[in-house]
């Protein structure tokens, strides 16, 4: 294939510039390397078509920009934190005062219960819950709303417990 040497020449000449562009997009050298590598893989697949248009670098930068936006949307701007927590976290069994809550939670439909446990006990976002359960974010919010409404109807409010009128 006559295109292979030309692709290799392009990569040899422009890889550093593309890596710098990836760093400007992501602000992280590791993500920049991933962006550059994935963009070059996609460029290689489209090389004959792109080379004919004589615009391989701009095409590659467009790929990198779109990949970065896509990744950014998925990550929702989360930054990994490699520092370990200073104290260990241990789950404690429910106290007697929480027993009513756990019994009321057990009466909910399976999905509503799963959404509420993942949201409030595991502290996951709607996106993470949707990924875990294989449902949409809107369905997560709907199950959470319905589950909370049912829990509110089953459990006495704190004002009723304290003896004051609602």
Image (spheres, rainbow, N blue to C red):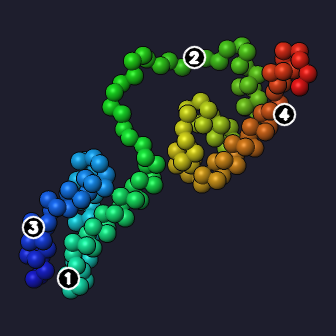
Q: Residue 115 in the image: x percent, y percent?
A: 63, 41
From the viewer's perspective, is residue 19 above or below residue 96? below
Q: Quadrant of residue 53?
A: bottom left
- Is 40 displayed left or right of 148 in the figure? left
N-term mark: 3 or 1? 3
N-term mark: 2 or 3? 3
Which residue corresponds to mark 3?
Answer: 13
Alpha carbon separation for disc pair 2 and 3: 59 Å
Which residue corresponds to mark 2?
Answer: 92
Which residue corresponds to mark 4?
Answer: 153
Q: Tell me which residue sits at (25%, 53%) in the image.
A: 23
Mark closer to the observer (2, 3): 3
N-term mark: 4 or 3? 3
Query: Circle 1 — which element?
Result: loop
Contact (CB < 8 A) between labels 1 and 2? no
Alpha carbon separation for disc pair 3 and 1: 15 Å
Residue with the most extreme right position? 165
**Viewer-side residue, 39 vs 135:** 39
Mark closer to the observer (1, 2): 1
Contact (CB < 8 A) between labels 4 and 3? no
N-term mark: 4 or 2? 2
Mark 4, other Cα within 10 Å: few <14 / some 14–19 / many ≥20: few
Query: Circle 4 — which element?
Result: helix
Q: Residue 102 in the image: x percent, y percent?
A: 71, 25
Q: Tell me which residue sits at (78%, 39%) in the image.
A: 149
Q: Tell me which residue sits at (31%, 55%) in the image.
A: 25
Q: Quadrant of residue 146?
A: top right
Q: Tell me which residue sits at (27%, 61%) in the image.
A: 38
Which residue corresponds to mark 1?
Answer: 54
Alpha carbon separation for disc pair 1 and 4: 66 Å
Alpha carbon separation for disc pair 4 and 3: 67 Å
Instruction: Count the marks.
Output: 4
């Amino acid at each position: 294939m006559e295109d292979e040497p030309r692709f290799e020449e392009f990569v040899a000449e422009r890889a550093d510039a593309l890596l710098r562009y990836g760093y400007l997009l992501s602000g992280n050298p590791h993500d920049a390397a991933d962006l550059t590598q994935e963009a070059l893989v996609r460029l290689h697949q489209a090389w004959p078509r792109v080379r004919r248009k004589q615009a391989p670098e701009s095409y590659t930068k467009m790929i990198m920009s779109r990949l970065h936006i896509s990744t950014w949307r998925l990550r929702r701007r989360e930054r990994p934190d490699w520092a370990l927590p200073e104290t260990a976290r241990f789950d404690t069994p429910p106290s007697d005062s929480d027993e009513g809550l756990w019994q009321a939670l057990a009466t909910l439909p399976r999905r509503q219960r799963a959404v509420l446990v993942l949201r409030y006990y595991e502290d996951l976002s709607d996106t993470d819950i949707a990924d875990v359960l294989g449902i949409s974010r809107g369905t997560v919010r709907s199950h959470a709303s319905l589950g909370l409404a049912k829990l509110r109807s089953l459990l006495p409010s704190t004002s009723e417990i304290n003896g004051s009128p609602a």
